[in-house]
Amino acid sequence: MTERRLSPLDRLLARADNALRTLTPGTVQAERSPTSSPTGPGSDIQPGTLPGDQRRHVLGLMRINHTGEVCAQALYQGQASTASLPHIRHAMEESAREEEDHLAWCEERIQELGGGPSKLNPLFYAMSYAVGATAGLIGDRWSLGFVTETENQVVKHLESHLYQVPESDLRTRAILEQMKTDELKHAVTAKDAGGADLPLPVRHAMTLMSKVMTFTTYRI
């Protein structure tokens, strides 16, 4: 079976649809569960059982992770829109689909903890899409290198969050552990596909931007 060729308008509409689904709560549904439970990660753990201060802190952490997944959607969609090689574009789109599970898991956990996603998500989506599209224009090797560095930084964030989440919060920990596994896979895949090592100033700029995102979305 031959693959249907999409017109530029088709691709534009698909990108717009992805943006609307990503930014509208409740529209993205997970296809996988990071545990054997058919109803979701740690579903046997009653949500909302954490003490007040712990609940608020975990909520802030999950809001950060949710915004990170919003940025991932935008980043991959932006890169796919400008990737020159078809197999690179398809790889970006496939990674974006896998990241949708993370988006849904984080959103569900935020709701269970009695909160809502960051109000800054539309801003960070637009910024990440622009960065992804620019990386794609520079070249596929650099675009893949950007994915590798991004995912490696995400893994470090997840490890830090796992250290902060109470051992008793099995629900949140199951989500973060599976996300970490997936992000590591994406980093290795991008590197093996020919991702270039980014210059040190670029990596530092990415780290700085990540700190701005985490500081603001934890609170807003």
Image (spheres, helix red, strand yellow):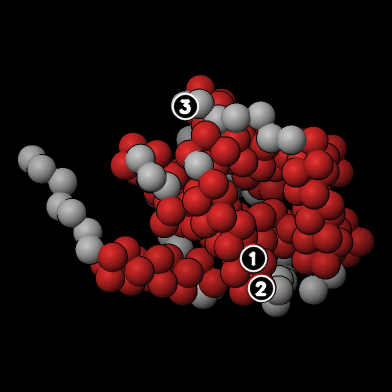
Image x and y of residue 158, in percent: 74, 41
Neighbours of disc 2 within 10 Å: few (<14), some (14-19), many (20+)? few
Q: Which mark is residue 23?
A: none
Residue at 10% across, 43% down: 2
Query: What is the secondary structure assignment of the residue under circle 3?
Result: loop
Q: Quadrant of the C terminus?
A: bottom right
Q: Is residue 146 left or right of residue 48?
A: left
Residue at 62% across, 74% down: 122
Residue at 70% across, 77% down: 119
Q: Which mark is residue 123?
A: 2
Image x and y of residue 129, in percent: 56, 62
Query: What is the secondary structure assignment of the residue under circle 2?
Result: helix
Q: Which residue is mark 3?
A: 193
Q: Is residue 190 left or right of residue 199?
A: left
Q: Point out the tag, 3 or 1, that comes first from the N-terminus.
A: 1
3D distance between C-alphas at marks 1 and 2: 6 Å
